[in-house]
Image (tube, grey):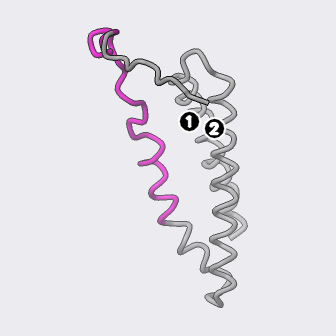
């Protein structure tokens, strides 16, 4: 078991730079908020994994039960990480015409 910790940690850390680069490549004009959101997503993932692992252990399924929960999550991660995440970009031809913008509604007070 201790020998498995080194490759698991190395592979886990090795995924961070390519994922961070992908986020920053799609963050045109706003790299700081995108970077902060990426860090937050990693933190959220860590917190959810700890919560799920703790819930499985608390259910009395044993100390190795979190592995059975973590394996499907780890298998799904590449699909989530590398799916096309960017929405379709609008071109000027796709933009709504200026005369389609609704007029402001007056507020009576």
Using the image, determine if residue 103 lies above or below residue 65: above
Q: Residues within 10 Å of mark 1 (few under 14, many from 20)?
A: some
Marks 2/1 in contact by CB < 8 Å: the verdict is yes
Element under disc 2: helix
Residue 38 marker: 2
Using the image, determine if residue 103 lies above or below residue 70: above
The residue stretch that appears in magenta: 72-98
Using the image, determine if residue 78 lies above or below residue 87: below
At 46% across and 48% down in the image, what residue appears?
78
Residue projecting furthest to the right: 2
Quarter containing the C terminus: top right
Residue projecting furthest to the bottom: 60
At 31% across and 10% down in the image, what residue appears?
99
Q: Quadrant of residue 53?
A: bottom right
Residue projecting furthest to the left: 93
Residue 107 point in image, percent of width and height: 55, 27
Residue 47 point in image, percent of width and height: 70, 59
At 27% across and 10% down in the image, what residue appears?
93
Spatial separation of the CA atoms under disc 2 and disc 1: 9 Å
């Amino acid at each position: 078991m201790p020998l498995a910790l080194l490759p698991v940690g190395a592979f886990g850390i090795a995924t961070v730079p390519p994922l961070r680069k992908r986020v920053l490549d799609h963050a045109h004009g706003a790299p700081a908020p995108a970077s902060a959101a990426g860090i937050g997503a990693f933190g959220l993932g860590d917190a959810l994994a700890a919560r799920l692992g703790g819930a499985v252990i608390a259910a009395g399924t044993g100390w190795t039960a979190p592995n059975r929960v973590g394996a499907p999550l780890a298998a799904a991660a590449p699909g989530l990480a590398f799916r096309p995440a960017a929405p379709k970009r609008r071109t000027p031809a796709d933009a709504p015409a200026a005369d389609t913008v609704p007029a402001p509604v007056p507020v009576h007070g």
